[in-house]
Amino acid sequence: MLRIKTIFVLLVGAVLLFSACDRTKKTQTNTTETTVTLPAFQNDSAYAFVKAQTDFGPRALGSEAHENCRVWLLNKLREYCDTVYNQNFTAKTYDGKSWPCANLVGSFGPEKAKRIVLAAHWDSRPFADHDPNPDYRDTPIDGANDGASGVGVLLEVARQLHENQPNVGVDIVFFDAEDYGPKESERIPGDWWGLGAQYWAKNPHIQGYTADYGILLDMVGTPNARFLQEQFSMRDAGDLVRKVWSTAYELGHGQYFQNKPGGVITDDHYYVNKYAPFKMIDIIHYDAASGTGFDPVWHTTNDNIQNIDKNTLGVVGTTLLQVIKNE
Ligand SMILES: [Zn+2]
């Protein structure tokens, strides 16, 4: 998916700490008072949304799985959101090819002025150029973590917001064509990553669209993930990073969201910050010990559903719902 330009150091011992957050609501009837526990973010549901995407197969541009997944995602957004947009565009990739692509947007409270964007990419990488086995380096990947994890969390967030409408407007954006950058061996200069985000930031789904801020998810299914503070996010929206990280800390997720500098990562948020009139941060697993900075299965054929941890999905999802609730 993306490139690390610089690597900052970190390594932390692993203590898994997970806390569930239940929301309760009191309802008054004629004579009795009952306490009803409302469902909060469901880890199993998020996991099922990740698996549903990988069950289509690799969602590489131009594939049947890509088109089938687009239709499925659009229908899920229509099920939960107030307004849904399918933004078609053509992606021109570094190898001179052109592909039919689509950014998908699901909006809650489209009339509200105050808005938050939640985003992830839904395409998967067409080649496993980091696979340990050279025979697989032209094979498309499932992208369970690199793509589907963020989308799965956001679909579950959408399902929850459908049950409990937020006070602010929320736009869930699924970017296409994030992960067709040049292979590791090719080293071709240019802005070949985040093509869907580049298109949307320059041509939003509504003319003149803006938001208060955005949060991007990428690789949010790693077991015992470490979400460090990515450097473009800190440069462009440091206060927002601190707000999200302190919200996670208050929920008991401090082992995941750590107040330490992460990598410098060219992900979709980089292009949103470059071209759109608001700022977006990136929640992304960072592992200095892995060599690439990412999960060991990154851009390999092992990036599949077996390596997704539903607890990590839950940590990110509950944090997002709390951030929205605090607005
Ligand atoms: Zn990737």
Image (cartoon, helix red, strand yellow):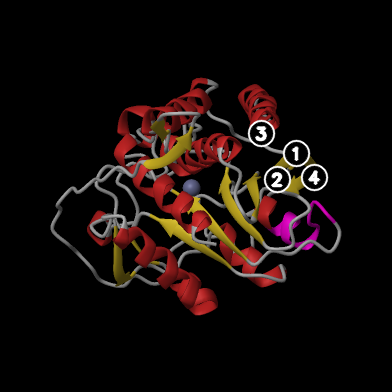
Q: First in sequence: mark 4 or mark 2?
A: 4
CA distance for labels 2 and 3 = 9 Å
Nearer to us of marks 3 and 4 is: 3
CA distance for labels 4 and 2 = 20 Å
Q: Does the magenta stretch include residue 205?
A: yes
CA distance for labels 3 and 4 = 19 Å
Mark 2 near ligand 1 (CB under 8 Å)? Answer: no
Nearer to us of marks 4 and 2 is: 2
Task: Find numbered disc 4 in the image and state the secondary structure of the residue it sits on.
Answer: strand
Residue receiving disc 3: 77
State which region is magenta. Answer: 198-206
The image quadrant where one finds the C terminus is bottom right
Q: Quadrant of residue 131?
A: top left
* Residue drawn where x is 17% and y is 62% of the image: 12
Q: Where is residue 267 in the image (x, y as percent from the top left)?
A: 53, 59
Residue receiving disc 1: 84
Q: Position of residue 144 (x, y in %)?
A: 43, 34
CA distance for labels 2 and 1 = 6 Å
Above or below — where is 86 with respect to 263? above
Above or below — where is 207 with respect to 69? below
Tell me whether circle 2 and circle 1 mark residues in contact (CB < 8 Å).
Answer: yes
Q: First in sequence: mark 3 or mark 4?
A: 3
* Residue drawn where x is 39% and y is 38% of the image: 300
Task: Report if residue 5 is visible in the image.
Answer: no
Label 2: few (<14), some (14–19) or many (≥20) C-alpha neighbours in 10 Å: many
Q: Which amino acid does label 1 sit on?
A: Val
Residue receiving disc 4: 89
Residue receiving disc 2: 107
